Image (tube, helix red, strand yellow):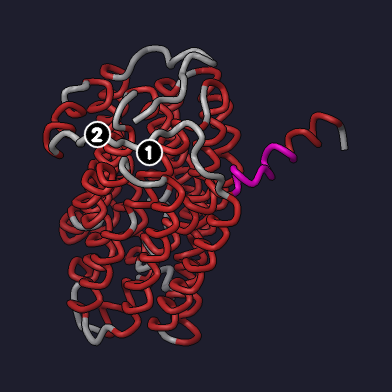
Amino acid sequence: MSADQTETTRRWLDPRLLAVGMVGFCAFLDLHCAQPLLQLFTEVFDVTPVQASLTVSVTPLAIALAAPFVGLVADRRSRKGFIIFSLALLAVPTFLAATANGLSSLVAWRFLQGLAMPGAFAVILAYISEEWSGGNLGRVMSANIAGNVLGGFSGRFIAGWMADHFGWRSAFLTLGGLTLVGAFFVWLWLPPSRQYTRRTTAAPPVFTTLRAHLCNPRLFAVCAVGFSVLFCLTGAFTYVNFYLAAPPFGLGPGALGSIFAVYLIGVIVTPIAGRHLDRFGHRRMLALALSCSAAGLLLTLVPRLTIVILGLTICSTGTFICQSAATTALGMASNRDRSAAAGLYLTFYYGGGSLGAVLPGFAWNHGGWPFCVALLVAIQFLTVGFALVTWPRRAARRGRLTPGVT
């Protein structure tokens, strides 16, 4: 192995990067785990696809509601301690979801899962923005997104496989246990903040802080793109389950969970994209990635499983690069109350995810998967145009972004 390869391996095995990735892994492990179970829920609870999709949409809705307030509270607490507490708390409703005796109680537990998640989501973004700077920021953000990708795949795959072999309740018990294990490794690997000074003065009123962030045009533009990105990803990977469960595919929960292996390509591509983000700027990379994602969605209209999988691979990989671009731009768009800024971004982002699990359902009811694809592709191209107009033409130069103090 060459010296360069050894150095690259050493950097990616840095315990701090592993901890950042583990936070992303644990957070996304539970977020969309219900997606491969949707067809099963329509049968077990005797409900429609749109009703079953509430088990997906309610979790990002809870994140969107809680995120800005959690961010403000987190600015007065230890970064590391708050992240670990949030992950441990997340395990509780995950375990309890296995006790649900109907769709309404399952939706309630899924909502409580969402309320516990922003403590990890928002604070790790603020932690990264504070502890790394300049040319390293894209690489570290990409490590977090790679953890998101791996967690998103693992949650869906484990849920589908467990449901096929041991019933859907076992899926939530397993995911709850893995969340606790992940919290332990974050405690082990994540160092305490060095650049963060806990707020000791009285915090400004919640809505004063949020209004100040919303009046920041760069931050608002990043938030709007985040809304669109998760709307499209959630819409695609929610309703493709019904598409693939129907003829001519006829896939069951285990096979549907395996389809999400396409996420693993993102684990490889996203860190590579992180280097290009630092080099070429998030604006250009976002436009290219969204265009690729739209092309992948169009490929899924070909009624052959291999082509559908290829299209989903392109779609998801493009979306993960978009998320890396947006979170990198987020760190550049705000230099104060960064947990609150991250919380506001998550409100938009997961608000898009919540609506993305429901609104394409009406397109599904009118025209099936082709109508869903038409809606999502249209939104992606509108987002490209919006980003090209509203995002700055050049990202901050390498080394220019310095850690802030909230």
Residue most toward the right?
A: 1
Q: What residue sits 23% from the left and 54% below the top?
A: 354
Residue of label 1: 294
Give the magenta range: 10-18
Q: Name the N-terminal-most of marks 2 and 1.
A: 2
Q: Quadrant of the C terminus?
A: top left
Is 342 one of the magenta-colored residues? no
Which residue is the site of mark 2? 201
Residue 29 figure quarter: bottom left
Left-right relation of 344 to 211 = right
Q: Of helix, strand and loop, which one carries label 1?
A: helix
Q: Which residue occupies 56% across, 32% down?
A: 139
- Looking at the rendered image, the quarter that the N terminus falls into is top right
Q: Residue drawn at (47%, 36%), measured in percent from left and top?
A: 128
10 Å crowding of disc 1: few (<14), some (14-19), many (20+): many
Rounded to the nearest angstrom, the CA distance separating label 2 from label 1 is 47 Å
Residue 230 higher or lower than 176, as above or below: above
Give above or below for 104 relative to 326. Answer: below
Q: Any mark on residue 361, and which?
A: none
**Dividing the picture into quarters, in which one does residue 324 lie?**
top left
